[in-house]
Image (cartoon, grey):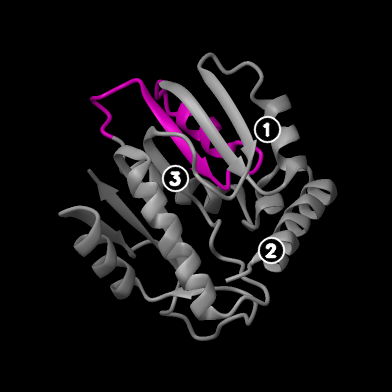
Amino acid sequence: MDLSKPLSRISELYSDNLERNGPVSTAVGWNTPESQRLRFEKLTSVVDASAQPFSVNDYGCGYGAHLDHLLERGMKVSAYHGYDLSEKMLDTARARLGGFQGELDLRQSTTLETEADYTFVSGTFNVRFEASEDEWKRFILGKLDEMHRHSRKGFAFNLLSTYVDWQEPHLFYGDPLFWFDHCKRNYSRQVALLHDYPLYEWTIVVRA
């Protein structure tokens, strides 16, 4: 399964968005800052607030907005490992997050290589371009296996929902029942499906 072409196009898409819009929500595909924060809230619900500080893998970190969100909420993050395809995004994240007091590790890679307490994926799997639905589904399944292996306390991810009236041909829409069942059977007995917020997507939270 060669996904080099769609992954390269995804990198170009977000690099171009960043150059055009700057480090704001629209650069990473979210229409408003409010919708971006709502997604972060749902993903962050995996965190055990009583067990801080904690370390983070952010797969598809963009310009580092999720770390901003965690710190603004007063959470203590000991290490932040950000992964992204776009070197421009990573350069922007390095400049923006230079004052972070914990370990800052930003890398251009599609493979998770660091172990952390929690792993977050926000919107990273939404764009598939010319990859087939089956190819992209298998790609995501492999990434979830990686997330499970590299997350000590849990992980959370979101996908566009199949409960929509229409679908864009270059995007990937996930059946929430399939993905919940997969996570429940393969990763943990503690799995939550969040599909009660006003966006055309859902979030799954997996606690170790």
Q: Tell which circle, 1 or 3, labels the residue nearer the N-terminal end.
A: 1
Q: Residue at x 52, y 32 (%)?
A: 81
What's the CA distance linking mark 2 and mark 3?
A: 23 Å
Kind of residue at disc 1: Ala
Q: Which mark is residue 93?
A: 1
Question: Number of labelled discs?
Answer: 3
Under circle 3, the secondary element is strand
Rate crowding at label 2 as few (under 14), some (14 to 19) or many (20 or more) other CA atoms within 10 Å. few
Q: Which residue is mark 2?
A: 4
Look at 24% across and 69% down and name the residue there: 181
Magenta residue span: 48-76
Was residue 69 drawn as part of the magenta stretch in this picture?
A: yes
**Of helix, strand and loop, which one carries label 2?**
helix
For the residue marked with disc 3, what is the amino acid?
A: Phe
Extreme-bottom residue of the structure: 165
User: Can residue 200 be seen in the rendering of this structure?
Assistant: no
**Residue at left 37%, top 55%?**
145
**Residue depicted at x 23% and y 25%:** 50
Q: Magenta segment: does it hold 7?
A: no
What residue does disc 3 label? 120
Direction from residue 186 to residue 127 in the image, left or right? right
Write down the quadrant of residue 203 in the picture. bottom left
Q: Of the residues under marks 2 and 3, which one precedes in the sequence? A: 2
Q: Nearer the viewer's eye, disc 2 or disc 3?
A: 2
Tell me whether the residue at label 2 lies in contact with that at label 3, contact meaning CB atoms closer than 8 angstroms: no
- SS under mark 1: helix
- Residue 166 position, x and y percent, is 54, 85
Report the side of 91 relative to 148 (left or right).
right
Left or right for 173, reference 130 = left
